[in-house]
Amino acid sequence: MKFTDALDRSLEDVKRPPNPPIGHYVWQVSKHPDNSSFEAKSTGKTFDRVEFTVKIVSPMDDVDPDDLADYGDVSGFTSRNSFLFDNEDEQAFERSLFNLKRFFEHLGLTEGEIAENLANSVGAQFVGELKHRPDPTDPEIVYAELGRTAPQ
């Protein structure tokens, strides 16, 4: 679909699409972070953000089949798995680095340097929980997000 196809639609006909059902899914890394996307700023502090784009491959047994039937095909639904590195707090930085290492292990990447594993992550699969989180400023908006991850 192209945006130009939607130009004749009435605003009353535009609805927020539903979120995929909660539960565990097999996910695949579709894009790894590159050097240009590392820096992030928040309330005066500078962080490095390492963000993977991931997509659902298939649902697992704990995803409600009725909810899945109502939603439709979940394959290809995308989310992000982000790691924030606090450049001003060494312990927080090391915790984030350890969490990144665990994610690499969930992808089956257990050796080599971090840069090498960033590149090798594309196409790797893992198990991840899809959860719903209400927007803190607008409870009518609910986000579908990747939660905890595990090896496949």
Image: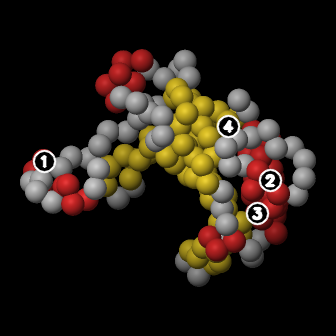
Q: Secondary structure at mark 3?
A: helix
Task: Identify the amino acid type marked 4.
Answer: Gln
Residue 129 visible in the shown view = no
Foreground: disc 1 or disc 3? 1
Mark 1 and mark 2 lie on one chain; the one further toward the N terminus is 1
Identify the residue at horizontal 66%, vertical 57% (top origin).
32
Identify the residue under disc 1.
13
Gap between marks 3 and 4, in whole Å?
27 Å
Foreground: disc 3 or disc 4? 4
Identify the residue under disc 3.
92
Task: Identify the amino acid type marked 3.
Answer: Ala
Mark 3 and mark 2 lie on one chain; the one further toward the N terminus is 3
Classify the position of the C terminus by image quarter: top right
Gap between marks 1 and 4, in whole Å?
37 Å
Badge 4: residue crowd in 10 Å (few <14, some 14–19, many ≥20): many
Gap between marks 1 and 2, in whole Å?
45 Å
In the displayed structure image, the side of residue 141 where residue 76 appears, left or right: right
Mark 1 and mark 3 lie on one chain; the one further toward the N terminus is 1
Badge 3: residue crowd in 10 Å (few <14, some 14–19, many ≥20): some
Identify the residue at horizontal 37%, vertical 46% (top origin).
142
Residue 117: assigned label: 2
Gap between marks 3 and 2, in whole Å?
21 Å
User: Residue 55 sits in which quadrant?
Assistant: top right
Depth order, front residue of 7/134 = 7
Mark 3 and mark 4 lie on one chain; the one further toward the N terminus is 3
Task: Identify the amino acid type marked 1.
Answer: Asp
Mark 2 and mark 4 lie on one chain; the one further toward the N terminus is 2
Q: Secondary structure at mark 4?
A: strand
